[in-house]
Image: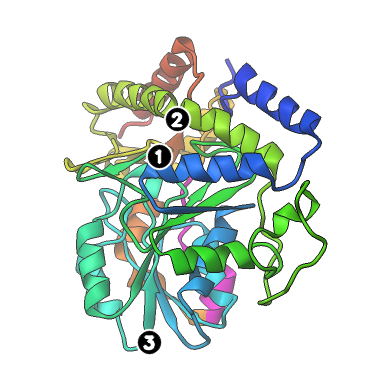
Amino acid sequence: MEIPFHKPYITDEEITGVVNAIRSGWLTMGPRTIEFENRFAGYVESEHAVSMNSCTACLHLALRAIGLREGDEVIVPAMTFTATSEVISYFNARPVFADVETGTSNIDLNRLERHFTEKTKAIIPVHFGGQPCDMDEILDMARAHGAHVIEDAAHALPAWYRYRKVGSLGDITCFSFYATKTLCTGEGGMAVTDNGQWAEAMRVLRLHGISRDAWKRYAKNGTWRYEVIAAGCKYNMTDVQAALGLAQLAKLEWMWQARREIADRYDEAFGGMEELITPFVKPDRQSAWHLYSLKLNLETLQIGRDRFIDELSKRGIGASVHFIPLYRHPYYRNKYGCGLHEYPASEWVFGRIISLPIYPGMMEEEVSGVIEVVTHLARKFKR
């Protein structure tokens, strides 16, 4: 049995929505995009939602909105995808890597304070795998240093922190709708905020810096006249993508429940095995379960993480690693001179972590198949 690492959950609702968008004749940003923004803002309990063509674009324009400048510093976790950090380089600003917790892979509060300086403009906490970071403490720490909090919530839809939804916590929160994410539009993202000035700035900047409602130029009551008021980007979403998003948003919590049930099955199967370490979720929050990241107890095994993944692949199980720490990549290592010894927790996690398949639409026999293979390998290669 071949079980892919991920498969988008697409049904007739998404297909019908996309077909209707195409038949409408409005393919780029239009009324469906605005409807998607409004519904999304209502869902995450935020005042404003600004759609874009990626979460990376959202992070970039969020940093522009808060006024990041050359020479500023932004704190990010050492274990995240490069997009979190690369957007900082767009400004000739400096990413500052903070180590993570071994249990959650989220940024470690005990290691965070030391990274704040007079140059710190913002912190970008990443909700790893869908579990919210310690947001109250992060917000308090940032406020004490005069810094903004921009959440990288690419994994965290939907997720709850102390009975509040991710999207209603930080200054600006950025979501991803990439093909593998919990809400999929193929490519896409959304930045949400309660700050109307920042939201307006991002709306203008996402479409060439043209004054608001530029997308209406070719609508019935639009006008050919427009004004460029800033040096912007081409980051807008399309109505075809938004049609996918609207259909996915309608079933978002059902898809979350499906992933959570798979996570519960994995926890039950792997929790009693000394060779395996199941994901740790803190009691005052709910994970989106975008990832199920199992860790290997290497001290009890004869093989390492890479070999374990190879053995999974030989048996038809797709798996991945989230993430190769930023400081290990040549670009960051050469530019900032990062050393492995500076991030002991990230190194510990990286050497052990494996992301297993977890997505709505997984059949019972597929979940059982993953469990069977993982437990078989753990026992086969036990010391």
Q: CA distance from mark 3 to mark 1?
A: 35 Å
Q: Indicate the quadrant where residue 162 lies.
A: top left
Mark identifier at residue 58: none
Q: Earlier in the sequence, mark 2 or mark 3?
A: 3
Residue at figure coordinates x 57%, y 15% from the top left: 1
Q: Nearer the viewer, residue 228 or 160?
A: 228
Residue 352 visible in the snapshot = no
The amino acid type of the residue labelled 3 equals Lys
Query: Could you tell me residue 151's position as x and y percent?
Result: 39, 59
Query: Could you tell me residue 238's position as x and y percent?
Result: 69, 45
Residue 16 visible in the snapshot = yes
In the rendered image, the quadrant that contains the C terminus is top left
Q: Nearer the viewer, residue 21 or 86?
A: 21
Answer above or below: position of 360 versus 128.
above
Residues marked 2 and 3 touching at CB (< 8 Å): no
Does the segment drawn in magenta span residue 47? no
Q: Nearer the viewer, residue 379 or 44?
A: 44
Q: Indicate left or right for 345 with 53 as reference.
A: left
Mark identifier at residue 43: 1
Answer above or below: position of 10 versus 300.
above
* Colouring: rainbow
Instruction: Bin the neighbour count of mark 3 within 10 Å (Cα to Cα): few under 14, some 14-19, many 20 and up.
Output: some
Q: Indicate left or right for 188 with 40 as reference.
A: right
Query: Could you tell me residue 186's position as x and y percent?
Result: 65, 39
Q: CA distance from mark 2 to mark 1?
A: 10 Å
Magenta span of residues: 321-335
Q: Which residue is mark 2?
A: 252
Residue at figure coordinates x 35%, y 59% from the top left: 346
Q: CA distance from mark 2 to mark 3?
A: 39 Å
The amino acid type of the residue labelled 2 equals Leu
Residue at figure coordinates x 40%, y 22% from the top left: 258
